[in-house]
Amino acid sequence: MLRGVLLIVLVLSIGHCSDMKDLVKKVLGDFIESSRNSDDVTKKDVGDLDCKPGTFLNETAVKCVPCKPGSFSDKENATECTLCAAGTYNNKKGQAVCAACEIGTYNGKEGQKKCSACAIGTYAGTTASTECTACSAGSFAATTGSSECSLCAAGSFSGPSASTCALCGAGTISAAAGSAECSSCPAGTSTGGVTSGAVECDDCSAGQYSSAESVSCSDCAAGSYAAKTGSAECSPCAAGSYASETASTECTLCGPASYTDKTGQSTCASCTAGTYTPYSGSVTCAACDPGTMSPAMAISCTPCSIGSHASASGSAACDACAPGTFADREGSADCSACSPGTSTGGDEGATGCAVCDVGSYAEGSGNAGCSACPSSTTSTTYSTGSTSLSDCIGPVLLAKDASDATLYTMYEAAPINNTAGEIASLVALSGDWKIRYADDPNEVMVISNGKSLNLGDNVVYTAVPDMVNVFCYIDTEEEGHGVYFRGNQVVDQKGNKCLSPCRNEARAVAGPTCQVEGEGGEAVESVCGIPKCVWDVQCYAYDGVDYRGNISTSVSGSSTYNCQSWDSNWPHYHSKFHPSPENAAAFGIGDHSHCRNPDPENAGQPWCYTTNVFTRVGFCANIARCEDSGLPIFSQ
């Protein structure tokens, strides 16, 4: 009361100031109002009290008492204060109402002086909340006092009551905000290299693949492919195709001349030599047929050229036909053997067989070469293509011991050394042979064809076969083109068996003939093919008895003279060597003046009577000696 009096005095003392009057009025009014609510306000009895809202009547103390914080009274003359309900509060005494907890705060009990902020991961979205609500999965509240939860961004997730969101792990995604969990990328997709926080799964490109929950797609390995996007695995290339690069979207067919017989290959193998394929996409190469070949990497097989062959399938090369065989066409699997009487001449790779020449033969089939007759000077065949040694016609002399075993065989003139006495006999297997003592050539022993001669002396002999008119004939008009031929040949020049001896009694220009069986079985004449003598025509052999040439001049001293005709006695008479059938056959004496030797006992070479009256006989020294001439005995 004293403070009021002092205040009034103070106001009155300054009341003369008009500006201060208003201030004094305001201060005084506030003082009076405050005094009404003062704890010190009392009355003498309860009935006189007037308690306002925010206070309550304390009947014991007979006064109005302010409500404590956390309580209120909203009526006058309340007898008690009411606790603030859960979700409300007040923090001052004497309150007529409680305030609702603001959003983001709460209290769960009555009589609270304040509200608590919601913990992280929870929220209160309305006022007067009695509790905070946990953020649902897929949302979060990062701070206390949150009035709402925020959705987790795409690429992240959360469980309930989360204060933060976690990024989706490798190979997983959340495509939209508010995800409670992340989804695994299925096989054939990936997060495109994003290791965390991915929002979508991308299909693997063609040529790539992935398993589930992949961060990135892998390239298909060489030998495999993925034709479409979104492949969970790569397919192996089929047999006959390949993929040389990684990340292939398709396989390439193996080209011609190559193949693969396995799946999943990065390369194709080349066809090996002896195999081929003309096709793309081959799983194998075919073997070349017999008669063909191929190098490596071939699209076709090449026929073997003539003269070569390939016996087996799958040949890398053709082999030359061996000597004695031939291939006369391309693509031969085997070479044919030369037939009897033919040969390849010793060469390999023959395209045909040559007929053996006259003077040679080939026995059996498959001959690399023809065999020469035993003597190149005295024996020959009468035709080409001879098939046996027996086709060689010529003189043959056997030297035998006392047991009749053959020591050796002779085919031409040669000495016989029997000084040791090993040779008991000589057998003329073919032709007539003249045997002489080496130291006395004038003594002649003749072994006729098929006969033998016993040798009684241990000396050296010489053996000379008769060739003229035995193994060759004199082809001259005077000699009747072989009219005196007396050989023992048994086949004609074609190898046909003779039904009669080879002779030329008709003096035919073709030479000796024989009869053979014709196609109708009748006997027909056929040329024997007897060789023509060269020796004793172009030269004289041995003593010149068989010389039948036409040289008609002789030499005496240094002079040369013409020969007198044998049928003439002028200028020199002679009686013994006139033409006669005997002299014609034995010595070739006829109505001509050619050199002859009808007197071998006294002359060792051809001679003639001369036309010079002073010179009776002249030797024909201008005729070469056959043994020294190098001329063949006969020609064919």
Image (cartoon, rainbow, N blue to C red):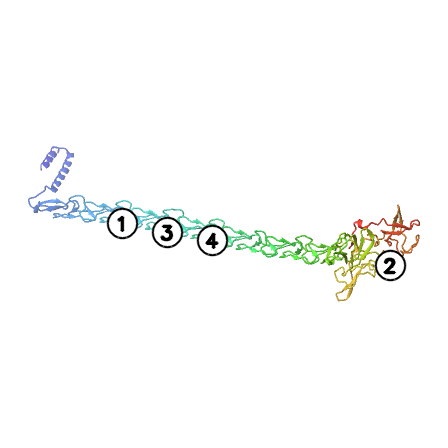
Nearest to N terminus: mark 1 or mark 2: 1
Q: Earlier in the sequence, mark 4 or mark 3?
A: 3
Circle 1 residue: 134
Q: Is residue 509 left or right of residue 233?
A: right
Q: Amino acid at mark 4?
A: Pro
Dot 4 falls on a residue whose secondary structure is strand
Residue 538 visible (yes or no): no
Identify the residue at the far bottom of this view.
521
* Label 1 element class: strand
Q: Which mark is residue 236?
A: 4
Q: Residue 53, labelled with which disc?
A: none
Closer to viewer: mark 4 or mark 2? 2
Q: Nearer the viewer, mark 3 or mark 2?
A: 2
C-alpha separation, residue under disc 4 versus residue under disc 3 = 27 Å
Task: Give x and y (percent) for residue 349.
Answer: 66, 53
Residue 292 placement (x, y as % from top left): 61, 55
Residue displayed at 15% across by 38% down: 26
Q: Residue 90 occupies which quadrant of the picture? A: top left
Identify which amino acid the numbered label 1 is placed on: Ala
Q: Is residue 245 left or right of residue 599?
A: left
Q: Which mark is residue 582?
A: 2
Circle nearer the viewer, 1 or 2: 2
Few, some or many residues within 10 Å of mark 2 (<14, 14–19, 20+): few
Q: Residue at the location (78% across, 65% down)?
A: 523
- For the residue labelled by badge 2, is the local secondary structure a helix, a strand or a loop? helix
Q: First in sequence, mark 4 or 2: give its number.
A: 4
Mark 3 lies on residue:
184
537 or 219: nearer the viewer: 537
